[in-house]
Image (cartoon, rainbow, N blue to C red):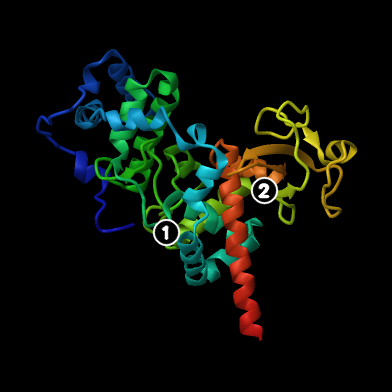
Amino acid sequence: MGKLLKAWSLCLCGLTLPAIAGAADYQASPEGQAFIRTMVEDYGFEAGRVERLLSDAQRKQAILDSISRPAEKTMEWHSYRKIFIRPERIAQGQEFMASHADALARAEQEYGVPPEIIAAIIGVETWYGRYLGNYRVLDALATLAFDYPPRSRFFRSELEQFLLMTREQGLDPLALKGSYAGAMGYGQFISSSYRHYAVDFDQDGVADILTNPVDAIGSVANYFSEHHWRAGEPVADRLSQDLPADSRLLTSGLKPSLNVADYRKAGLPVPDSVSDALPARALRLKAESNHEVWLTYRNFYVITRYNHSHLYAMAVHQLSEALKAGGERDEQQTDG
């Protein structure tokens, strides 16, 4: 799993931690005490181990600042797109796909998820493993579990899952790093997703999405499969016709509540290849000087299960299309 990671028992048994400037004393708070009881009574942890972990956890104001202003909620599409649809990210994505062509092909065969979608997720999340996050996962989850009331319940659950995950995988909970929300590895799985969807895709006995791109590829594909990705179905189509901002066809909520037939009846030019019965949702996105109208389908909604944002899903879709186009050009040149 990686020589830098120590087994849970080695890092915690008999550990005496020095006082650390900035420590939040989470273990002494009522919420912290309740958390310790949960880990002891429900999961069989030793109280002293959990207390020592919480005493080491540090409150990070930068984490609270970041979660209060995520790019998906503060940026328009034209600015958000520039972060991800860039020549260097496309070129590096094609290199990633070439380096892991066998694993990507096997993932598509086993899970039905196209290679370019898997690569685009990893590209958007971590720039193909180049940027895995600089926050200790323990600090991120403790800060959000105990100092971020809007989602404290969720993050306390994730902190539980993190301790379970590190125990199961033999990882050092003090060493793992990730995003400000505690997501880890190539595909930035949160702890519960790691436990439920990570797979040992290279069959070496360990499901390692932290340092092993092959396991990450299989795990991302498994995540999509478990969230009902439909092989062969489209993701989204850009339409040539604009819609007014108050159009009833611009439904709220990420899950499609209309179908393609509804949009055809309204006169929108949907491609003939798309079935009338396919669930669909129209998006109106702010471009540089105008608006783009996209008709998104069931598989687009599946992408939003990875990150609950239509901007995120559109970035993944467009990056995947760029990666696919580049691969097709390479094949044509090779055939020629």
Q: Which residue is mark 2?
A: 229
x%, y% of residue 126?
42, 52
> Residue most toward the front?
289
Mark 1–mark 2 Cα distance, whole angstroms, equals 27 Å
Is the N terminus in the top left, top right, bottom left or bottom right quadrant? bottom left
Dot 1: within a 10 Å radius of its alpha carbon, few (fewer than 14), some, or many (20 or more) residues?
few
Q: Does dot 2 land on a helix, a strand or a loop? A: loop
Does residue 29 sit above or below 40 in this rendering? above
Q: Which residue is mark 1?
A: 205
x%, y% of residue 283?
69, 38
Q: Is residue 105 left or right of residue 273?
A: left
Q: Quadrant of residue 211?
A: bottom left
> Residue most toward the right?
265
**Residue 320 image label:** none
Residue in the image at 61% along x and 43% along y: 289
Is the C terminus in the top left, top right, bottom left or bottom right quadrant? bottom right
Q: Is residue 11 left or right of residue 77?
A: left
Residue in the image at 33% along x and 21% along y: 146
In the foreground, 257 or 71: 71
Please tell me whether mark 1 or mark 2 is closer to you in this view.
2
> Residue most toward the top?
30
Does residue 149 sit above or below 318 in this rendering? above
In the foreground, 226 or 65: 65
x%, y% of residue 150?
43, 19
Q: Earlier in the sequence, mark 1 or mark 2?
A: 1
Q: Are the residues tagged 1 and 2 within 8 Å (C-beta)?
A: no
Q: Does dot 1 land on a helix, a strand or a loop? A: loop
Which amino acid lies under the numbered mark 1 shown in the image of this protein? Gly
Q: Is residue 329 left or right of residue 32?
A: right
Q: Quadrant of residue 332?
A: bottom right
